[in-house]
Image (tube, rainbow, N blue to C red):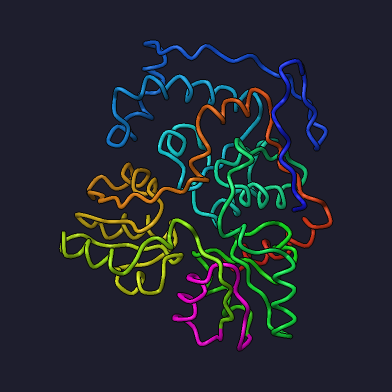
Amino acid sequence: MNSVVRPPLSPSSATVTLSTGQMFERLPRPDLAWTPEIAAETAPVYEKVRTVIPAIEWPVYAPLVSAINRLKRQRGAVILAHNYQTPEIFHGVADIVGDSLQLAREATRAKGDVIIQCGVHFMAETSKILNMDKAVLIPDGEAGCSLAASITAADVRRLKALHPGAPVVAYVNTSADVKAEVDICCTSSNAVKVVESLGVPKVIMVPDEYLARNVAAKTRVEIVTFAGRCEVHERFTAEDVAAWKADDPDVTIIAHPECSPEVVAASDFAGSTAHMIDFVKRRKPRKALLVTECSMADNVTAEAPETTFVKPCNLCPHMKRITLEKILATLLDMSGEVTVDPAVADRARRSVERMIAVG
C-alpha cells in the first residue's frame, strides 16, 4: 500500500501538522448535553430521519450532529458521505452525498481545505488523489472494502501479461496502487459507457466479477473478469428474490449490479445507488426492496415518502465503522489523515480523471 492513515494524537499533543503543512490546535471535547436549544437547532434534521430513527434515540445523536456541524465550519472542512452511511450521518452532517462517481466528481469541487471522507478507505484515497493540496481525513482507518482488498497491482500486471494489448478498466473500489496500473476507472453508474468508450473488442475489468458479468450482458465488448466480489452483495441470491416476490407480489425489486447476474435478471430494475434513487423518485413504486446495503433504504426514505421500503438487511461492516463519535474525534484531533505517494497519485489520477470525463 502506498497510502497511510495517521493515528490519533496522543492526549499530550497540543497541535497537529498535516502533510499539507496545515497546523491545527487539538480541541477539547465539547459538552454533548441534550438541551432545548439543541432540540430546536436539529429539528429540521430529525424531520428527515424520524421514520428511521426512533425519537428516544435522537437526544443521543442530536448533540453530536450540532457539535460536528459547528466544528467543520471552524476547521474549514467539508464532509463527503456515501449512500451507505447511516441516516444521522447522511442527513445530519454530510455536505455532499452520493455514490462513488458522484463523490469523485464532487471531491474535485470541494471548497474546504480539509475533506472528511465518510465512507471506506479507497474513497478517501480517491479524494486525496484528486486533491493532493488538501488534507483528507477518514474517521476510521480500518474502514476497508472486500473488493479493494481482493486485488493488488501485481494482479493487474499479471492480467496484462496474459492479455497483451487489452486495456484494463478498474472499478473505483480499488486501491491507489491498482488505479495507478490501469487505463481507466469506472463505477457501477458508468461501467458500460466506460468499457465502450475505449473502442476495442476486448477489455480486462477488475476486480468485481459480478459487475463485469453484468456489463458483459449489455455490450458486445469481450470482458475478461477477475474473481473479486463484494461481501455484502454476493450474499443475495436469485432464490431470495423469488421468495420476496412470492411473499409480496406488489413489491418492486431493485438490485445493485454488484449482485450476481442471476439476482439482476430476477429483479425489476438494476443500477448503481444513484440510479436506484433516481428510479424510485421517478417511478414512485408503492413498495420497493433495494437489494443492496441496508442503509440505502433508510436514506432514500426522506426523498421518497410515497414509497414503503422493505429491507433485506445486509450491512457493510466497513461502512458501519464510521460513526458520529468518530467524526467528532477526527475534527477535534484532525486525525486519520490519508496520504498517497505522489508518484502513485500522478498515475492513478489519470485513470480517475478519464472516468470522470466519460461521465
Residue 209 within the segment the image draws in magenta: yes
Q: Residue at x 40, y 38 (%)?
A: 87
**x, y (%) of residue 211?**
49, 70
- Residue 283 magenta-drawn? no
The percent coordinates of residue 252 (x first, y second) are: 24, 62
Q: What's the magenta region? A: 200-222
Q: Residue at x 63, y 80 (%)?
A: 198
Does residue 121 appear to the left or right of 269 in the view shown?
A: right
**Vertical position of residue 59 compared to residue 285: above or below:** above
Q: Nearer the viewer, residue 255 or 230?
A: 230
Quarter of the figure with residue 75 = top right
Up/down of 213 relative to 340, above or below: below
| Image position of 216 with respect to 318: above or below | below
Pinpoint residue 172: horizontal percent, then vertical percent.
60, 61
Residue 298 relative to residue 111: left or right: left
Q: Residue 176: x percent and y percent?
A: 71, 57
- Vertically, is 69 above or below 107? above
Report the residue at 73% width, 65% height from top: 153
Residue 154, quarter of the rendered image: bottom right
Q: Quadrant of the C terminus?
A: bottom right
